[in-house]
Image (cartoon, helix red, strand yellow):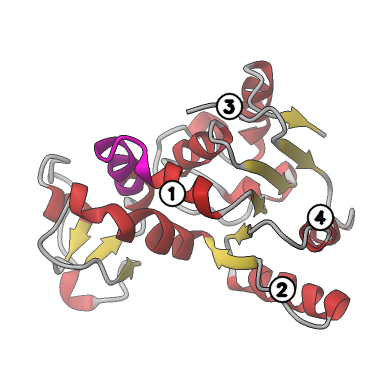
Amino acid sequence: MSSNHSNKIIVASAGSRKTTYIVKEALSNHTDNILILTYTIDNINQIRNYIIRENGFIPTNITILSWFSFLLQECVRPYQNFVYSDKRIETVYFPPDIGKFKIDRRFIKKENIKSYFLVGGKYIINEHISEFACLCNDKSNGKVIGRLGEIYSKIFIDEVQDISGYDFDIVELLLKSKIQCYLVGDCRQATYFTTCSPKYKKYKGKNIINLFKRLAKQKFMFCC
């Protein structure tokens, strides 16, 4: 895995036209496949509407996904058999959406793949999906990230301050890949988080700037 020194992190306050930057950068490339990721449905709709307003339509080389859709469709499903092959993982489970699966999971060990990561054998728990994706990548000798590198030339992660837990591991794997990554956000606007996991809590919310500084020092990205 080779690091890509053209990665960028853009930290800017509200009203500084971060979404405008993402859209214009994406629309300026007419040949490479580009993936735009963000956390909330509102942000997805905002980006889609902006592209249509600027361009008239969403170009075929631009894909827009929510963070959890990305993890499920692009990271977990293609290589889930390296970790779990009993059933096809259908969707992400957000407790307590499926009432019959309300169970005490505090004492379930990670070695019990089916019970730790899944409920009902086919619903992957939102708190553990990024950890499962990392496990798929590890067990497949990097095929998850390698596949993404064959599909996408650039990945934009909007509202990156919402990232937490094992999602940081996914981001770092992307930054170390051949994909050119743009992380865009405002550290002071962290209101929603992708998980409640205590992992990497020192980087959560406004403290994510400390992660950016570490990655920049390691030359995995440039801060802007």
Residue where numbered disc 3 is placed: 3
Counting residues from the N terminus, which is met first, the one under dot 3 or under dot 2? 3
Disc 3 and disc 2: Cα gap in Å?
28 Å
> Amino acid type of disc 2?
Pro
Counting residues from the N terminus, which is met first, the one under dot 4 or under dot 3? 3
User: SS class of the residue under badge 1?
Assistant: helix
Residue where numbered disc 2 is placed: 59
Q: Are marks 4 and 1 in contact (CB under 8 Å)?
A: no
Q: Is residue 18 left or right of residue 45?
A: right
x, y percentage for residue 58? 72, 76
Looking at the rendering, which quadrant does residue 203 occupy?
top right
Nearest the eye: 56 or 221: 56
Q: Residue at 53% across / 26% down in the picture? A: 2
Query: Which residue of the protein is positioned furthest toward the bottom in this rendering?
Result: 56
Residue where numbered disc 4 is placed: 25
User: SS class of the residue under badge 4?
Assistant: helix
Counting residues from the N terminus, which is met first, the one under dot 2 or under dot 1? 2
Disc 1 and disc 3: Cα gap in Å?
16 Å
> For mark 1, does the 10 Å Cα neighbourhood hold few (<14), some (14 to 19), or many (20 or more) residues?
few
Disc 4 and disc 3: Cα gap in Å?
21 Å
Q: Look at the image and give the residue range highlighted in magenta.
A: 132-143
Looking at the rendering, which quadrant does residue 101 occupy?
bottom left
